[in-house]
Amino acid sequence: MTGADYNFAYLDEQTKRMIRRAILKAVAIPGYQVPFAAREMPLPYGWGTGGIQVTAAVIGPDDVLKVIDQGADDTTNAVSIRRFFRRMAGVATTEHTAEATIIQTRHRIPETPLAAGQILVYQVPIPEPLRWLEPRDTETRRMHALRDYGAMQVNLYEDIARHGAIAKSYDYPVLVNGHYIMSPSPIPKFDNPKMDRSPALQLFGAGRERRIYAVPPHTPVRSLDFDDYPFTVQRWDECCALCGATDSFLDEMIMDDRGSRLFICSDSDYCRGRQGAGEAAE
Amino acid sequence: MYVALKGGEQAIDNAHAWLAEERRGDPSVPALSATQIAGQLGLAVDRVMAEGALHDRELAALAIRQARGDLIEAIFLVRAYRTTLPRFGTAQPVDTAAMALQRRVSATFKDIPGGQILGPTFDYTHRLLDFAAAADPSPAPRAAEPLPAAMPRVLDLMGAEGLIETPPAAAGDAVADLTREPLDFPAGRDLRLQALARGDEGFLLALGYSTQRGYGSTHPFAGEIRIGTVAVEFVPPELGFAVALGDIDLTECEMVNQFKGSAMAPPQFTRGYGLVFGHGERKAMAMALVDRALRAAELGETVKGPAQDVEFVLSHCDNVQATGFVEHLKLPHYVDFQSELELVRRLRRAAAATLAAEREAAE
Amino acid sequence: MTGSGPILTAEGLGHDFGRRMAFTAVDLALWPGEVLGIVGESGAGKTTLLRGLSAQLTPCRGRVLYGDRQGRQIDLYAQSEAERRLLLRTDWGIVHQNAADGLRMNVSAGGNVGERLMAVGERHYGQIRARAADWLARVDLDVGRLDELPSSFSGGMQQRLQIARTLVTAPRLVFMDEPTGGLDVSVQARLLDLLRRLVGQYGLAAVVVTHDLHVVRLLAHRLMVMKGGLVVESGLTDQVLDDPQHPYTQLLVSSVL
């Protein structure tokens, strides 16, 4: 497969225009899921076809792309998607969050705060936050339209009644701009506060489910909770074994068959940056 | 250290090289050509064309070879190619009554104008492994039988009596296209038929079978199955008249279903329709069963089986979507899992503390 | 605070299913705190009428007016669906014959009662829970079963839970469709007693559809008798039951006695 046989960034220009129109609508109605005619992509459904289409629609030759999966640049799916765009668009790629103009992600928001002008593209498997309460699209669309969200809050109530806490650790639903309930995609709830009033543009693409939605810069994003059971994020007793960070999301590594554990930053760029800074300071 | 194993370029390159090696197989055995696949594994090629939604034997054969015979993978390859092709318009509806037939059977009438033609079918073969053919697969020549040029469709014959619903005249109407517009519910019949035509044969087969076992019965009869070649015509706007683009192979199945009548319609037979590229009789029949089952709501029947549920069927019939999402589970989910680990540990700590407090209180 | 007019008015209300008339030419006015019984045999159109009155089915003819807390008369079906749904979550309540239609069977008793509070913006878990527990007690349910699923409740208990869920947001108007249907006679008696107590205590206006004259004798101030989609007789409950004028009402009353 070579880029020469295909249009810039794989998709034809008509398709890109269609996707851009969907993105514009999504930006105009924060948190609202805009249906779009997702194309079949050369990568499988569930592997990021929505995010790839969004990225392909917004990327230009001068963009610098970063792709992460689980926070890291070197996970196989991130490598594969980065290669795809290197081949199909010939754009520069980077692993440094601060250098990237577009960051496509699966399951994480980078630890380094995003800046104005950056675009974060999320790969979304199930865009409908009400899906597990109501399997039918016709019904969930009506629930969104009428803001009939009692059932969602009941779900959280049931968690507290049963477990003493809201037992949702990722894909934790948020209320966008005080109106639509939105799925943040399966990022850990640790990352939810980063969405709130972010200066970056956040775009969400779900290929198989044919939906695009967005959080424009500086939009309020509130994680659902109760006044007396406020939203909290995960904390670790350990710090990163490589960079010593105490403020980042840590992956747990099993080191040997006796079950020894090591905790390491999920965000590989953030970790490397801290290690570099540490060495420079010495 | 372990962290270095997180993934990487080298691992992918090695995997691809290994795959290429496996694909080729034993190098002392001659490689299969796509021509051989197109010629001798014709039904596999047909299935890839049908569910890949692209009528091109050579490309389908190439895809099958590249996919090492994994047909869903081959369908995926064809789809990913097809989606990049420019659209220059919509063809005229094909006239299956004018089909150059290879096969045509009806289960509803013993004798039909033009007769029943079995054609190249597995029906009535004894399913005994043919060890002799393994040594010499060259067949004995068949008796040539002259076929009439065009035969009327059986259901058209019934229509003359008013016993069967008249299909809505679709000529000229714009038809839906789920590859260009997002699939939306409620879905009209055109959209449903398109989704079913692209849908997974196995899934539709199971759904069709379920309607025969009481999950949304449709009382079906195979009104007619025909396989053959039709011409595709197109009217370029600058010319204003139809020009032939070429011929395609099609399998068409029209089911006749009992209908007891409703407030709006008298008792009559209704139709279920199946149409697929190439020779795909099983798929076309299953599609016709499911198409009719999906009309339950429209015809005022109780929706009680999965095959009658439009959202259920249309959301799950596409095997490229299904395989992608099922298989994505092998991608790393350690961030989510890490979050769950943390949660379970915390809940366990809380539960243990409660238990300890209770014990203490009891003492 | 309550307006001077009726809380619910129907004018020339009618509905057809295809060519079949379900009910027609229904006029009624319900006043705050009043309970109206609608009786008749099954197929008389009373459940369809109830659905037409309670924003669950848009009728083919006529209109329904709701007199809100500010004394305005609101044309129900001229409202948007969002406004009607809001009404159903706040000022109105519906008690279904089948408790499963009015409850979430996979959500705890507390969650079921709390949902209506959360739907109108309550966000304090402790307060929601306290009010749910309070309402369980008010309908004579064991507060200790707050976290149990309705599926572990008996039919009568499910019905009382549904009533608690309906009344927790202090509605002004409640619609009930055969509220005691499908229950044992002794359970029916307890439930009726409870309903009578609650209706009196909170000054609820209610429309009760039933085929059971005992229910309306106990609950309803006024009565409408329906047959074949038409109102054949209406008046004060005692008057209609003790001195029925229409031959059908006479038959209905005599068949019970």
Image: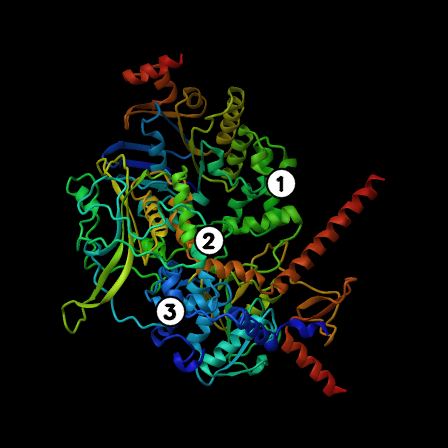
On the question of residue A181 being in view, the answer is: no
The reply to whether discs 2 and 1 touch (Cβ–Cβ < 8 Å) is no
Amino acid type at circle 3 is: Thr
Q: Quadrant of residue A255?
A: bottom right
Amino acid type at circle 1 is: Asp
> A155 above or below A35?
above
The foreground one among B342 and C89 is B342
Reading the chain from its start, which is encountered first: label 2 or label 3? 3
Residue that mark 3 sits on: B35
What is the x, y in percent for residue B52? Answer: 38, 63
What is the x, y in percent for residue C150? Answer: 56, 36
What is the x, y in percent for residue B14? Answer: 59, 75
Residue drawn at x 43%, y 21% is C217
Label 3 sits on a secondary structure element that is: helix
Local crowd size for mark 2, using a 10 Å CA cut-off: few (<14), some (14–19), many (≥20): few
Q: Chain of mark 3?
A: B
Asked if residue B126 lies left or right of residue B335, the reply is left
Asked if residue B309 lies left or right of residue A155, the reply is left
CA gap between label 3 and label 1 equals 67 Å
The reply to whether discs 2 and 3 touch (Cβ–Cβ < 8 Å) is no
Residue C147: give its label.
1
Q: Quadrant of residue A3?
A: bottom left
Seen as rendered, the residue at the extreme right is B363
Residue B206: give its label.
none
In which quadrant is the N terminus of chain C drawn? Answer: top left
Residue that mark 2 sits on: B131
The foreground one among C195 and C2 is C195
> B354 above or below B35?
above
Amino acid type at circle 2 is: Phe
What is the x, y in percent for residue C95? Answer: 46, 34
